[in-house]
Amino acid sequence: MPSAVINFAYLLASVLFIFALKGMSHPRTAVRANLVGALGMFIAVLVTVLDRRIVSYEIILAGLIAGSGIGAVLALKIRMTAMPQMVALLNGFGGAASALVAGAALGETIHAGGAFDLQFTIATALSGLIGGVTFLGSLVAFAKLQELIGGAAVVFPGRHAVNVICLLLNISLCVLVVVQPEQLLWYWLLLGASCVLGVLATIGIGGADMPVVISLLNSYSGLAACATGFVLQNNMLIIAGSLVGASGIILTEIMCRAMNRSLANVLFGGFGAQAAAKGEDVYKGKVKAASSEEIAMLLEDAQRVAFVPGYGMAVSQAQHAVRTLAGLLEERGTEVFFAIHPVAGRMPGHMNVLLAEADVPYEALKEMEQANPLFPQTDVSIVIGANDVVNPLARTDPKSPIAGMPILDVDKSRTVVVIKRSLSPGFAGIPNPLFAADNTLMFFSDGQKAVNDIIAALREG
């Protein structure tokens, strides 16, 4: 295939990727952007397969069928609540693929007796380092999200020193790969050491920071792909990896700002490692439980109602019931909006995805900056499974672990209804004074059941 055709196809695919990223910045254009990005990837893969006869087409077809089958099964089996885990796995597989391809390219060059230039060896070392960190780091994130291991940050004395030693070992192995590329053993030792570094770097991060971690690992997977692009001298892989890496870093920075924390604090602060604080002094004698009938009476007279979703809504799959309740209120002339915190849930945009699945209008979704000015004029705010993102201690207690974190100011509403199974703390491990506030009513129940009970009571009334 002529190089001009290949370069034009890669350029077209790159432009489609950029338009896809631009379209994903708004929910209304996100679906079309996904299709545009998929078209760009199809063009890139097709041209690469036709141009580079690395293996026989029979093997490529077999891989295509196997991969498509696995993807179809996962798409059908994985629930929306498990999507963060799925994203973590995909990040990990991307990093592993980049590292293995770079290793295979190095082995092929050694076998062929080819010459090693500096770009090739440095890119190979970086691909192994970043790919290994991404792979095992993503598996740890998956295990935390899937609750296969504890979600709390795992810290131990001297952990920072251990991390530094492991990082220095990885850097030393990278140097050996560059200086002695003909020794393939150095590369596989680097890959193993980078996997250990990925575990150490991720195990010390608590579940509350998983949205940031997933975004960062996504960036790592792109950077690993970019490095592998330099190994293979494939412009498309370089461009696509750069776009993923850059967009992931930008999103990570946005998420950190939403929590009023630095990336260094997220990675090394051990946030969430402390034992859960006891809430007896905060809650004793102050918590007011309510029934679905009492909440329905409040909603009958409300002029403006806010829904504040959290991970509890995702776990109970309550988004469709919430959409039904919102529609019922709107039919009665009530103004309804949904207040979305940037780090609600367990991955960036988690709540937006769930509500979009339930056909909640995009216009009804309000980001934190839009929602907070509305709360003082809101009659009822219904919090469904959210905790730390509505905890007023972030504003009032400078010694709190979440001090300074921007929150949704639901406590300023006329009445707050919190739907939660219990008074258990969120990932931050601290009590929430909102649950004991004078204007708060607690509805202890599963999210979906609670909302359905309120719908039934509202219709009967």
Image: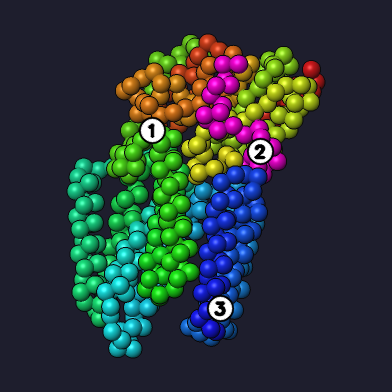
Q: Position of residue 388 (x, y in %)?
A: 46, 29
Q: Quadrant of residue 43?
A: bottom right
Amino acid type for the residue under numbered disc 3 = Val
Amino acid type for the residue under numbered disc 2 = Tyr
Q: Position of residue 172 (x, y in %)?
A: 20, 64
The structure residue drawn at horizontal position 25% and vertical position 81%, both measured from the top left corner, is: 182
Q: Identify the mark at residue 260; answer none if there is no mark.
A: 1
The structure residue drawn at horizontal position 44% and vertical position 41%, both measured from the top left corner, is: 254
Magenta range is 353-377
Pointer 3 residue:
5
Name which of mark 2 and mark 3 comes first in the sequence: 3
Whether tag 1 and tag 3 are in contact, CB under 8 A, the answer is: no
The structure residue drawn at horizontal position 51% and vertical position 22%, both measured from the top left corner, is: 409
Mark 2 falls on what kind of element? Answer: helix
Does residue 191 appear anywhere in the picture? no
Pointer 2 residue:
362
Amino acid type for the residue under numbered disc 1 = Asn
Q: Is residue 308 above or below residue 378?
A: below
- Number of other residues with Cα within 10 Å of mark 2, as a class: few under 14, some 14 to 19, many 20 or more: some
- Number of other residues with Cα within 10 Å of mark 1, as a class: few under 14, some 14 to 19, many 20 or more: some
The C terminus - image quarter: top right
Residue 325 lies in the magenta stretch: no
- Number of other residues with Cα within 10 Å of mark 3, as a class: few under 14, some 14 to 19, many 20 or more: few
Q: Is residue 150 above or below residue 109?
A: above
Does residue 61 appear anywhere in the picture? yes
Q: Main secondary structure of the magenta part?
A: helix
Q: Identify the mark at residue 236; answer none if there is no mark.
A: none
Q: Position of residue 288 (x, y in %)?
A: 56, 14
Q: Position of residue 351 (x, y in %)?
A: 57, 39
